Image: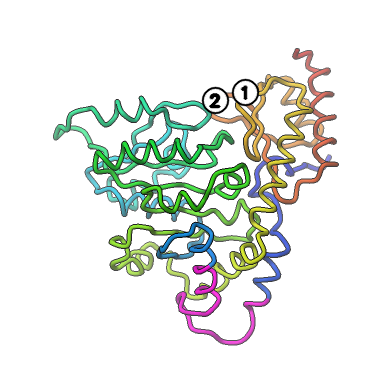
Amino acid sequence: MPIHYDFASDNAAPAAPEAMAALARANRGFVSAYGSDATTTRAATLIRELIDADAVVRFLSSGTAANAIACAMLARPFETVLAFAQAHVVNDEAGAPGLFGHGLGMTPLAGTAGRIEAAALATALSRPDTPHHQPPGALSLTNATEYGACYTNDQVDGLVATAREAGLGIHLDGARLANAAAAGFDLRRLGRSGVDIIILGGTKAGLPAGEAMIILDRALERRLDARLKQAGQLASKARFLSAPFVGMLEDGAMLRHAAHANAMASRLAAAMPFPLVHPVETNIVFAAIDDSALRHLHAAGWLAYRAPDGSVRFVCSWATTAERVDELAEALCAARDRSGQS
């Protein structure tokens, strides 16, 4: 039986037609290298317009590299980054922040559905500095969160203000920032929120590859390209990382596709025969499914993964169709009936 990857991850989705068309347009003739070409300049301009802020923009090949380099830019090797306990930078990047940060630590904070609790941040900042522990040097937020929830602008502003008062740098992992924006998060307010570095996800939003590093603190620009070169992230043919952003931003395709993905998740949540574990605010649905039901679902060819909290995750993308959502819902009902899970 063929395996259906449709809901395993938005990483499994094809690239959006707008991104591929822009990539094909950029693949003409000879241009200057290392990001000095007109396509890369245009992509950076569109991103600055998206967040309504002056910023330095660079295009990197992966979110892991972008997040790790950002954390290393904001905290020193003897410091730590505060982040949600199950954030991607904490659990899913194989220690990359510590590698790029030459010993930089990661400190997990409590929260709900991936959102850091204000009290947890305050507690972490209240601990006295000692020579035996890495003190906090930066705060890392994720929007949309790993559990599909969306911080409001006021929530981000509150956490950022607390961290800034303590002298921390601020990193935002925006692997699914387009989905947060489509859910109502105001990107123009984000540009003025006090965040130092934003990573705007491309891959999960429908690009073939590439993430945008948006640096709002201009003091971090000094020798930036040397840092990226050392990390293997200064692309010589940068137009092939930046061009898809042009295609996805010029006519609003990125946010339009993200809104569709969010709508498909809402459709799946409405048909879900198992209890929902987290609020469905963007493009991901988490359900309480036991091992027997999950085995039946896998046997029917539908691939889905357990999240760190034990729930089962289903991710919708720009390419998800209502028909496939309904097919999955039927398979979920059959898995429930065969397993006897109520």
285 or 219: which is nearer to us?
A: 219
* Residue at disc 1, secondary structure: loop
Marking on residue 165: none
Q: Position of residue 17 (x, y in %)?
A: 73, 63
The correct choice, above or below, for 250 with respect to 85 in the image is below
**Residue occupying image coordinates x 36% and y 26%:** 120
Q: Quadrant of the C terminus?
A: top right
Q: Position of residue 208 (x, y in %)?
A: 63, 61
* Residue that numbered label 1 is attached to: 277
| Residue depicted at 61% across the width and 25% down the height | 311
The crowd level at tag 1 (other Cα within 10 Å; few <14, some 14-19, many 20+) is some
Q: Residue at x 43, y 50 (%)?
A: 67
Marks 2 & 1, CB-CB < 8 Å contact: yes
Q: Which of the two labelled residues, at mark 2 and mark 1, occupies the earlier sequence position? A: 1
Q: Is residue 156 above or below residue 69?
A: above
Instruction: Look at label 1 and name its amino acid.
Output: Val
Q: Residues within 10 Å of mark 2 (few under 14, many from 20)?
A: few
Front position in the image: 217 or 296: 217
Q: Which residue is mark 2?
A: 309
Q: Nearer the viewer, residue 140 or 4?
A: 140
The x and y percentages for residue 146 are: 54, 37
Amino acid at the residue labelled 2: Asp
